[in-house]
């Protein structure tokens, strides 16, 4: 969940709640660094400020939030050793991603009636979130603020960080580039590349490439997913239609190329709602049983 304010505790013990627009990188480095705390009651986690176009607050290095804190998250060890840009989805807890994948599969398989009923109440989550923020914004403006650097309040920031936006392949727009998304579509091809593969996933004649790169191969937790991409081909042969749901980074190399979805963890995608390593276990077991029957 996005952290929208931080409590500054001055050397004399006086506390002030600050929001992003109160802070500039100069002020942060000069006065606030190491003195910002989680806004939740009784939470001792320190908060740091990341500057940039989308400035944001984040949890200080390895500090932990209290058990009751709404900003608490489970750290997933990423040990890619390749490059650090791969740490982006570290703050989305495993359970939340699994739930989102489940939900995406359900959405893909809704009947027309169910779909019509659903469309009237989608987006309710971000909207309610926005209301909460507007209120807290008001409550802090009454206080004496350190500085205001005149930056526009970025509406992107209103979206809680761990809310995973779902997109059918044909719903992906330029706004999704560079963001974490849950992508839904049908697998149309599997091209094996060494221990991994490149998938092409389509929906309504739009396609995306799903790629698994060095960081995926290097991640120790992914070892049970390497060399298992044949299972998707087999599933395609057996069922005729393989639905893909996967969470990763959306990227686009050039205007002419189709977008790419970069997956970092084996558990971040499903085929027909099945984890690929479990699918391999099922197929191998079935092969074995068939061999037994025929001998
Ligand atoms: Zn906290």
Image (cartoon, rainbow, N blue to C red):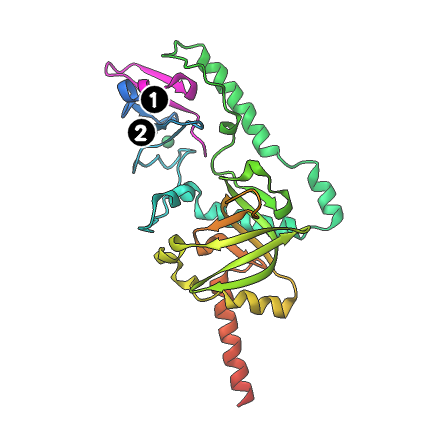
Residue 83 numbered mark, or none: none
**Sequence-wise first label, 1 or 2:** 1
Percent from the top left, x then y, of residue 249?
Answer: 48, 45
Residue 15: say if magenta.
yes
Which span is picked out in magenta?
A: 1-27
Question: For mark 1, what is the residue?
Answer: 25
What is the quadrant of residue 237 in the picture?
bottom right
User: In the picture provided, is 50 more to the left or to the right than 128?
Assistant: left
Q: 53 or 55, which lies in front?
A: 53
Question: Can residue 194 be spotted in the picture?
Answer: yes
Q: Residue at x 43, y 43 (%)?
A: 89
251 versus 43 height, above or below: below
Q: Residue at x 63, y 51 (%)?
A: 106
Q: 73 or 156, which lies in front?
A: 156
Residue 224: say if magenta.
no
Percent from the top left, x then y, of residue 56?
Answer: 41, 28
Question: Can residue 74 be spotted in the picture?
Answer: no
Q: 37 or 252, which lies in front?
A: 252
Tag 1 and tag 2, C-beta contact below 8 Å = no
Which of label 1 and label 2 is nearer to you?
1
121 versus 106 height, above or below: above
User: In the picture provided, is 12 more to the left or to the right than 139?
Assistant: left
Specify whether tag 2 is near ligand 1 (CB below 8 Å): no
Percent from the top left, x then y, of residue 264?
Answer: 43, 51
257 versus 150 height, above or below: below
What is the quadrant of residue 224 in the picture?
bottom left
Question: For mark 2, what is the residue?
Answer: 46
Measure the C-alpha gap from mark 1 to mark 2.
17 Å
Q: What residue occupies the far right of the structure in this picture?
A: 113
């Amino acid at each position: 969940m996005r952290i929208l304010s931080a409590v500054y505790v001055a050397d004399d013990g006086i506390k002030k709640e600050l929001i992003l627009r109160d802070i500039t990188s100069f002020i942060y480095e000069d006065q606030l660094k190491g003195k910002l705390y989680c806004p939740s009651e009784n939470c001792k986690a320190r908060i740091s400020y990341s500057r940039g176009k989308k400035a944001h607050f984040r949890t200080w290095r390895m500090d932990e939030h209290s058990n009751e804190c709404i900003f608490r998250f489970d750290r997933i060890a990423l040990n890619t050793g390749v490059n650090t840009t791969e740490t982006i989805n570290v703050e989305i807890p495993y359970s939340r991603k699994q739930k989102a994948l489940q939900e995406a599969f359900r959405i893909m398989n809704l009947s027309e009636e169910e779909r019509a009923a659903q469309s009237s109440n989608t987006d309710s989550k971000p909207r309610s979130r926005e209301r909460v923020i507007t209120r807290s914004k008001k409550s802090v403006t009454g206080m004496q603020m350190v500085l205001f650097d005149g930056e526009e309040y970025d509406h992107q920031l209103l979206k809680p960080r761990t809310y995973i936006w779902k997109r059918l392949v044909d719903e992906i727009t330029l706004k999704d580039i560079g963001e974490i998304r849950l992508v839904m579509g049908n697998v149309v091809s599997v091209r094996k590349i060494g221990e991994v593969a490149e998938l092409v996933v389509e929906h309504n004649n739009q396609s995306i490439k799903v790629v698994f790169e060095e960081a995926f191969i290097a991640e120790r937790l992914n070892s049970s997913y390497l060399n298992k991409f044949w299972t998707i081909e087999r599933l395609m042969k057996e069922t005729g239609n393989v639905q893909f749901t996967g969470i990763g980074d959306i990227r686009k190399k050039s205007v002419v190329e189709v977008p790419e979805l970069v997956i970092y963890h084996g558990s971040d995608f499903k085929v027909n709602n099945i984890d690929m390593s479990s699918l391999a276990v099922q197929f191998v077991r079935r092969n074995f049983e068939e061999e037994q029957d025929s001998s």
